[in-house]
Amino acid sequence: MDGTPGDRAVIRSEPTPQDVATGLSTGGLARRLGVSPTTLRSWDHRYGIGPAIRPDGRHRRWAPRDVAVLETMCRLTSAGVPPAEAARAARAAAGAPGDSRASADAPRPAAGARSHAAGPLPLGDVRRECRGLARAAVRLDVPSVERQLAKAVEAHGLVVAWQEVMVPTLRAVGRKWASSGDRYVEVEHLLSWHVSTALRRFAPPAVGSGGGPAPGPVVLACMPGEQHTLALEALHAGLGERGLPARMFGAAVPAEALTAAVERLGPAAVVLWAQVRSTASLPLARRVARARWGVKGARLSPLVLPSGPGWIGRSDPGMPWPTSLKDALDTLGALYSGDAPPTGR
């Protein structure tokens, strides 16, 4: 349970003249930590994480010890630890009176742990890493967002990090944005940008590997009018992680440009993303599937994968519709492992 003002262990120390002169203001500390002044006042009120120096009873000054406690608090909440638990650990790390726990006993979220704690975004039953990533995004704390994303990929691998950390957090931000008017749009933009940046660290090779003629690359394109690219970027990263060649065309690829690219590249597969039903054009998907190249008598065509929620109930029976990132990667990987039949003749 969260602490209350009546049962909190408040950290207060006698200020020295030097502390009064050099202590940080609330606004300065908020900027340093990447949180709002309101958050600092709330943590003081609810958990006793407050400034030791109040020289005139009104203007707060935060001494180095106070700053160290707040830095620990921010680090733990960014890792997904609930605020009340993080406050207790931060006080313990600072040697608060009445708490004999060593700083080494500070809580560390277990890999794969689920979190039901209340938070600023409607996350529900998710991995604890989602909670920390959401808190960092709401604070616009870029260093913490980058650390959380890198840790998630390192700890769980790209597929799990995407499906169980990045996607739930992005969806929660989207829901909050949709229900709050123009509020939280900056959070959504910041989080999307850094998720994209994390995914782009995986660069697919320019050509396939192995003996014999290499299959063509995987072409990744959003349907005309479709602006949502992050899922395709995750697939592009997953192909890179597996060492498979790909060409990423991104958002809203015009129909003529898409078919021209397919005819020029001779891809092994074409993934067509549609986030909404209005952008999922089955005639265009069939047109891409009919593309041909190669010598007479041995002409090939691509495997077309309609992907994304816009295709639900609309894809062709001859076109696989992957339901997850892993499903898409397994389907495409089979084309390069020899486990799949030739794409078309």
Image (cartoon, rainbow, N blue to C red):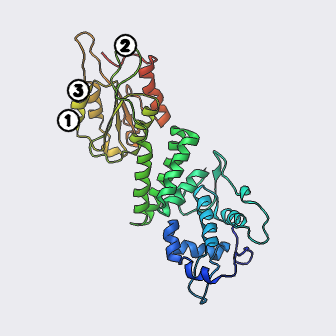
Q: Which residue is mark 2?
A: 212
Question: How far across and down, in percent of the image, does residue 259 sit?
Answer: 23, 31
Q: Quadrant of the N terminus?
A: bottom right
For the residues marked 1 and 3, what is the alpha-carbon distance in whole angstroms?
12 Å
What amino acid is found at the position of numbered circle 2 in the picture? Gly
Q: Which residue is mark 1?
A: 256
Query: At 26% across and 24% down in the image, what residue appears?
Result: 290
Which residue is at the far top? 297
Q: Residue 264 bears which disc, if any?
A: 3
Q: Marks 2 and 1: which is nearer the front?
A: 2
Mark 3 crowdedness (10 Å alpha carbons): few <14, some 14-19, many ≥20 = few
**Residue 91 in view, yes or no:** yes
What amino acid is found at the position of numbered circle 3 in the picture? Arg
Q: Marks 2 and 3: which is nearer the front?
A: 2
Of the image marks 2 and 1, the number of the one nearer the N terminus: 2
Question: How far across and down, in percent of the image, does residue 214 sit?
Answer: 35, 19
Label 1: state its secondary structure: helix
The residue nearer to you, when weighing 216 against 287, is 216
Mark 1 crowdedness (10 Å alpha carbons): few <14, some 14-19, many ≥20 = few
Query: At 50% across and 68% down in the image, what residue appears?
Result: 32
Query: At 42% across and 33% down in the image, what residue appears?
Result: 240
Q: Is residue 224 above or below residue 50?
A: above
